[in-house]
Amino acid sequence: MKVFKILGLGPNEDDKRLKELVNKSYKSVKVVGRGTIRIDPKEVRETEEFKKARKQAKAIVGA
């Protein structure tokens, strides 16, 4: 791993922070490619944050 750091190919501080953020988010988060993540939509819909945002969107749209 040290060789990768010397060549500038190892993870930097931003990479480490991003990895920590992903690990602390949803249980179903998977990094599947360069810049691509997958999250189970059901898990997202069950969060209080999503439910609150949905209510706010309904109020804006008037539905």
Image (cartoon, rainbow, N blue to C red):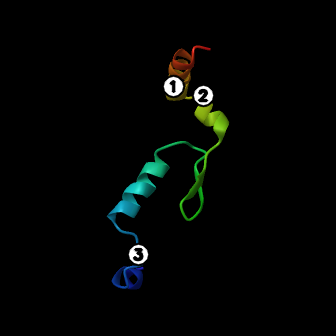
Report helix, strand or loop for mark 2. Answer: loop
* Residue identifier under label 2: 46
From what the image shows, is residue 36 above or below residue 57?
A: below
- Whole-Å distance between the Cαs marked 1 and 2? 12 Å
* Residue identifier under label 3: 10
Is 30 left, or right, of 8 in this rendering?
Answer: right
Return the x and y of residue 25 as percentages of the image width and height. 49, 43
Question: Which of the two residues, 2 or 10, is positioned nearer the viewer here?
Answer: 10
Return the x and y of residue 62 as percentages of the image width and height. 57, 14
Q: Identity of the amino acid at label 3?
A: Gly
* Quarter of the figure with the N terminus: bottom left
Is 13 left, or right, of 22 in this rendering?
Answer: left
Proximity of marks 1 and 2: CB atoms separated by less than 8 Å: no
From what the image shows, is residue 61 above or below residue 50?
A: above
* Residue located at (58% from left, 57% from top): 36
- Whole-Å distance between the Cαs marked 3 and 2? 36 Å
Report helix, strand or loop for mark 3. Answer: loop
* Residue identifier under label 1: 53
Please rate how many residues cluster around mark 3, counting C-alpha atoms within 10 Å: few if below 14, some from 14 to 19, many from 20.
few
Question: Which of the two residues, 42 or 58, is positioned nearer the viewer here?
Answer: 58
Return the x and y of residue 32 as percentages of the image width and height. 62, 60
Quarter of the image for residue 34 reads: bottom right
Question: Which of the two residues, 10 or 37, is positioned nearer the viewer here?
Answer: 37
Please rate how many residues cluster around mark 1, counting C-alpha atoms within 10 Å: few if below 14, some from 14 to 19, many from 20.
few
Proximity of marks 1 and 3: CB atoms separated by less than 8 Å: no
Q: Identity of the amino acid at label 2?
A: Glu
Q: Identity of the amino acid at label 1?
A: Ala
* Residue located at (48% from left, 50% from top): 23
Proximity of marks 3 and 2: CB atoms separated by less than 8 Å: no
Return the x and y of residue 42 as percentages of the image width and height. 66, 34
Q: Earlier in the sequence, mark 3 or mark 2?
A: 3
- Whole-Å distance between the Cαs marked 1 and 3? 38 Å
